Amino acid sequence: MALDSAEVAARVAAAVPASSARAALTASRLTIEVAPASMPDVLCFLRDDPAMVCKLFVDGTAVDYEALRGTVEVIYVVRAMADPSRCIVVKAAVDAADPVMPSQVYAGANWAEREIYDMYGVHFEGHPDLRRILMYPEFEGYPLRKSYPYQKRQPLVPERDPLVNPWPRRY
Amino acid sequence: MSTEESRKNLATAADPLSEVMELQMGPSHPACHGTVKFDLRLDGENILSCGITLGYLHRGFEKMCEQGTWTQVIPYTDRLNYASPLINNFIFCEGAERLCGIEAPERTSYLRVILSEASRIADHLTCLGMGATELGAFSAGFYMNEARELFYNLFARVTGARVTVSYGRIGGLTRDVPDDFEQQIRAAISRTEEVLRDSEKMLERNRIFTDRMAGIGILTQEEALSYGLTGPLLRATGISYDVRKAAPYMVYDRMDFEVPVGTKGDNFDRFAVRFEEMKQSIRIIDQALKQMPTGPVSVNDPRFVLPDKKDVYNNIEGLMNHFKIVIEGVRVPEGEIYFAGEGANGELGFYIVSDGSGRPYRIRVRPPCWYGMAALENMVRGHMVSDLAAIFGMINMIGGECDR
């Protein structure tokens, strides 16, 4: 299957008109930029489209461009099972001051989004369990933001009595 | 209370196993490798649900990468999957090289393939050996440790360190391998083949071991894809996805090897896939050793590669290049890339963003075992507590890679 960037962009735009999709193709990957609100529709389209079949959720991450453009770019990487030689990178830029976007349907997105929330403070609406994952609940700030100094100290957290005040958990 | 009465009380008292028990397992439980905590809800011995707490080994890898030069990222990558650090080194370097628009010399590509496959064998031996040990098969575990040790000694001879190797460089390698490298690796492989034969007999025909592995922790193909499982976990379900075949890098396209797949997606398939992969890795190493040309191991480009010490001390250009690279760092052109290779546990990806300065703007690692851990709850639900150790062992969660 040959992936053509213009064709893919047109098909994504036709399937999800609100996405205002733009696509670029390089040797190893296809990059699609979409509006944050339409990300779930775009990913569902890519997953269910018989010509792409992007069933493999590869990764979800973010890049902080707050100082440059005032945005945080949330990035999902999926692979088309029809042609796994290329990965498909779908990006959406959210406002860095108030980062909100919908959560994705892939099972793997659960933890990926928890990590993005943990590290960048992006809130995913509809996420079943949005808590910090690598940091502890009392951690202040979002460590992978460029505005977070890498040597910053965190306040001391009082010792917990796990019986009186158990760790927040969800089974 | 008479004996009669206490018997009657015992008979009418509520069965303590009839209520749900909460059990915290780890992080200091031996099967949890000190890096993960399970909050289990148990019905007797059966797991109703399993909450997972990570982050005990979080060191801020991605934040620290942004503080130094590109070359200073390489020692950090050793500490991701510390069972196969060379693979991390090489995949990061390959990704950065693609951004720089340079290609490593042919000899380097072959050496990277050979050392990656040797690391894959060492990683699988660690995973399977530890997994077998956790199920009580100590002998097989020690046999595999012996073979792993041969490869670690080989890495020590090549790189100067057993685990913290830092052997890859953007544009090449730190140095060429020793003269007797081929002889050394062939000796390690021939002993490893014996170990594999022995331990295969000990495990695959062992009724206790197979009973504890077969039918445990099943995931369907759809679930595995949606969770983002790759590597042996995905191939155990029967999907033949291997980055070395799907998107070949280095010189994997010149190698003749097969991608073993399972049929049921259970723990035994994960074990068997890893076992077969080691044999395929031996095939790849054999072919690569035969095809490997002689030549330089680093590109001849002073923008990316440190000059020889003789030039640094004897001429001004060498000294300037040396200082430029050490102080300012390699200037990776502006751009971004997602580059993935097949790590021992699955697709190891680096999402690299460069702003054109000497320091990385963003380096994201896609740790393969992270998504395995995300799927763990789904795999253990309904099984017994003792199966948790087996399933967790076959995910091969490496704390350094998962928590970063």
Image (cartoon, grey):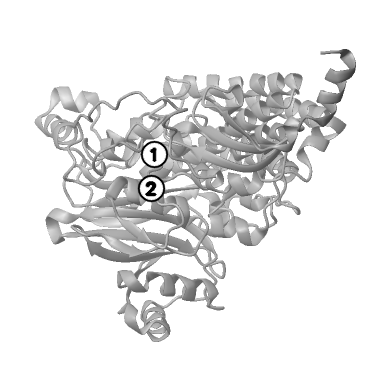
Q: Is residue B317 above or below residue B178?
A: below
Q: Is residue B281 above or below residue A86?
A: above
The answer to which of A22 and A25 lies nearer the viewer is: A22
Location of mark 1 (residue) = A134
Find residue A59 and report its horizontal and vertical position in percent. 44, 55
The answer to which of B115 and B349 lies nearer the viewer is: B349
Find residue B293 and report its horizontal and vertical position in percent. 49, 40
Tell me the crowding category of disc 2: few under 14, some 14 to 19, or many 20 or more residues within 10 angstroms, Cα based. many
Tell me, yes or no, if residue B382 can be seen here: yes
What residue is shown at x 59% (from left), y 27% (from top)? B185
Image check: B12 left or right of A163? Answer: right
- The residue most toward the right is B4
Image check: B229 left or right of A90? Answer: right
Q: Are marks 2 and 1 in contact (CB under 8 Å)?
A: yes
For the residue marked with disc 1, what is the amino acid? Leu
Find residue A7 and report its horizontal and vertical position in percent. 40, 82
What residue is shown at x 57% (from left), y 38% (from top)? B117
> Which of the 4 quarters of the picture holds residue B329?
top left
The secondary structure type at the circle numbered 1 is loop
Location of mark 2 (residue) = A115
For the residue marked with disc 2, what is the amino acid? Glu
Which quadrant holds the N terminus of chain B? top right
Disc 2 with disc 1 on a shared chain = yes
